[in-house]
Image: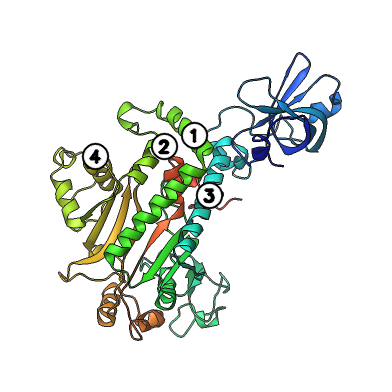
């Protein structure tokens, strides 16, 4: 039985076996108190070893980080902080941890240090809590879509197309790095490669997701995506997970409704099912906030921020209206923005957060962006300048969802691919869905790590994925 279940048991001196890792051990008046944790909960269970119950040789091996199996009776706890504890009868040591070398001693460790030992950091309270929340959110995603009639579509990891048209992709090849075969033009001859063409790791499953929606009506993808962006920031990873629903017969307003309902469901699910972990992470965040200047401190606690999303109707406005608000803001007039504001810019996080946190004080959905700053597949508005795009903006994070109604008119789509320089032959299959039974459809992408970042209150995206992949870093 796991510790989470044991802590909910009524103590009746029933015999139990606890298999876990030692968090701490202290000895007082010849009685040893051992805090055990198996990762099933943020809470430890205390094992009490009375004098002469366990040999000194075995007890010496029970140190922070060691793995043990404790057999004993579940009794009512005499101390504060827990209802039950284990009165130990015997201890079997599975694996020792030299206290001189084990890096996770019972003291405060910096997040930077813990990133260097990502193979051990799940054993800390902070990271075990984050990983449990991450699991709960992943489960909630599948549950939401399944309960709403969506089909889970597995889109390819290896692709011959660039969904975003950005070109920042990881190449997949079996050709030799030194002296690869060349064609008559002196360029690498990808006809000799494994797939017979140039291929990359996917940046998005969206294009293939659209193909599924054109037959199954409602699909979603949830898988790893890759960006070869040389960005060493707190918001970027080279490998991350994306959730991308795609729905036939949806227009922009349907897409906004789905995005709002979906993300409210996920945040509510976390509040209802991860209470202990969120409470721990909230306390951790409060302690961190105390070290910041007052003007840098968050106005809301973690729980308040999560409830803020669930309880507020998202404000909806166009990009053009948002630019007007920003231009008329005190922050702009007093030159407090680091980036300039004018129609046509790609909004920065500071602009997005101003709209959410200062102006509307609620989550925001921005729509109808200039087509020049958005991807080729977005449906063009009648004005010829904007597209039916939408971004969902959150407090403390800025954009968390990006999506659009897709261009279903073949001629307009071909024209747009020419404008952005995407060869028709590379996405012939995508264009054909507009030839044969084209239909209005829409969808969006939610970066899973940004969602986990928001729900856990962490400030660096490298701390919400087990093994972060970033420029010059592919350890573990």
Q: Can you say whether 71 is above or below 235 in the image?
A: above
Q: Considering only order in the chain, which callout, 1 or 3, is on the residue closer to the N terminus?
A: 3
Q: Secondary structure at mark 1?
A: helix
Q: Which residue does the numbered mark 2 point to in the structure image?
A: 303
Under tag 3, what secondary structure?
helix
Q: Which residue is mark 3?
A: 136
Residue for badge 1: 279
| Left or right of 308, for residue 101 | right
Marks 1,4: beta carbons within 8 A: no
Spot occupied by residue 53 in the image (x, y as percentages of width and height): 85, 24
Which residue occupies the foreground of this view, 160 or 325? 325
Dot label at residue 218: none
Residue 293 in view: yes
Q: Which element carries disc 2, helix, strand or loop? A: helix
Across and down, in percent, residue 98 comes to 74, 32
Q: Residue at x 27, y 54 (%)?
A: 365
Mark 1–mark 4 Cα distance, whole angstroms, equals 26 Å
| Mark 2 neighbour class, 10 Å CA radius: few under 14, some 14 to 19, many 20 or more | some
Mark-to-mark CA distance, 3 and 1: 15 Å
């Amino acid at each position: 039985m796991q510790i989470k279940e044991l802590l909910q048991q009524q103590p009746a001196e029933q015999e139990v076996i606890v298999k876990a890792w030692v968090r701490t051990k202290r000895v007082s008046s010849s009685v040893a108190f051992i805090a055990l944790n198996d990762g099933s909960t943020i809470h430890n269970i205390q094992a009490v070893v009375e004098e002469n119950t366990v040999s000194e040789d075995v007890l010496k091996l029970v140190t922070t980080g060691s793995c043990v199996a404790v057999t004993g009776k579940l009794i009512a706890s005499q101390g504060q902080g827990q209802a039950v504890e284990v009165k130990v009868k015997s201890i079997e040591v599975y694996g020792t941890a030299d206290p001189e070398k084990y890096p996770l001693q019972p003291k405060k460790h910096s997040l930077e240090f813990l990133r260097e030992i990502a193979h051990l950091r799940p054993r800390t309270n902070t990271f075990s809590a984050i990983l449990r929340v991450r699991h709960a959110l992943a489960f909630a995603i599948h549950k939401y879509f399944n309960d709403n009639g969506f089909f889970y579509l597995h889109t390819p990891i290896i692709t011959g197309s660039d969904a975003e048209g950005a070109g920042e992709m990881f190449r997949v090849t079996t050709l030799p790095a030194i002296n690869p075969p060349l064609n008559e033009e002196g360029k690498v001859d990808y006809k000799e490669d494994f797939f017979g063409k140039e291929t990359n790791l996917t940046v998005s499953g969206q294009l293939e997701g659209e193909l599924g929606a054109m037959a199954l009506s409602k699909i979603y993808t949830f898988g790893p995506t890759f960006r070869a962006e040389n960005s060493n920031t707190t918001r970027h990873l080279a490998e991350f997970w994306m959730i991308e629903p795609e729905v036939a017969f949806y227009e922009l307003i349907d897409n906004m409704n789905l995005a709002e309902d979906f993300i409210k469901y996920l945040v509510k699910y976390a509040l209802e099912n991860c209470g202990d972990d969120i409470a721990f992470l909230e306390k951790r965040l409060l302690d961190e906030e105390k070290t910041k200047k007052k003007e840098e401190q968050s106005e809301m606690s973690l729980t308040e921020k999560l409830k803020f999303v669930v309880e507020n109707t998202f404000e909806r406005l166009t990009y053009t209206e948002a630019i007007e608000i920003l231009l008329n803001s005190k922050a702009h007039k007093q030159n407090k923005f680091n980036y300039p504001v004018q129609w046509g810019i790609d909004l920065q996080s500071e602009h997005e957060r101003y709209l959410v946190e200062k102006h509307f004080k609620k989550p925001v959905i921005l729509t109808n962006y200039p087509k020049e700053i958005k991807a080729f597949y977005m449906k063009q508005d009648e004005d010829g300048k904007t597209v039916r795009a939408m971004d969902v903006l959150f407090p403390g994070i800025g954009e968390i969802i990006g999506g659009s109604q897709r261009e279903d008119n073949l001629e307009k789509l071909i024209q747009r691919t020419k404008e952005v320089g995407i060869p028709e032959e590379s996405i012939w299959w995508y264009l054909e869905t507009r030839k044969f039974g084209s239909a209005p459809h829409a969808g969006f992408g939610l970066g899973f790590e940004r969602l986990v970042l928001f729900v856990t209150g962490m400030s660096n995206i490298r701390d919400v994925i087990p093994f972060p992949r970033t420029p010059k870093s592919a350890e573990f």
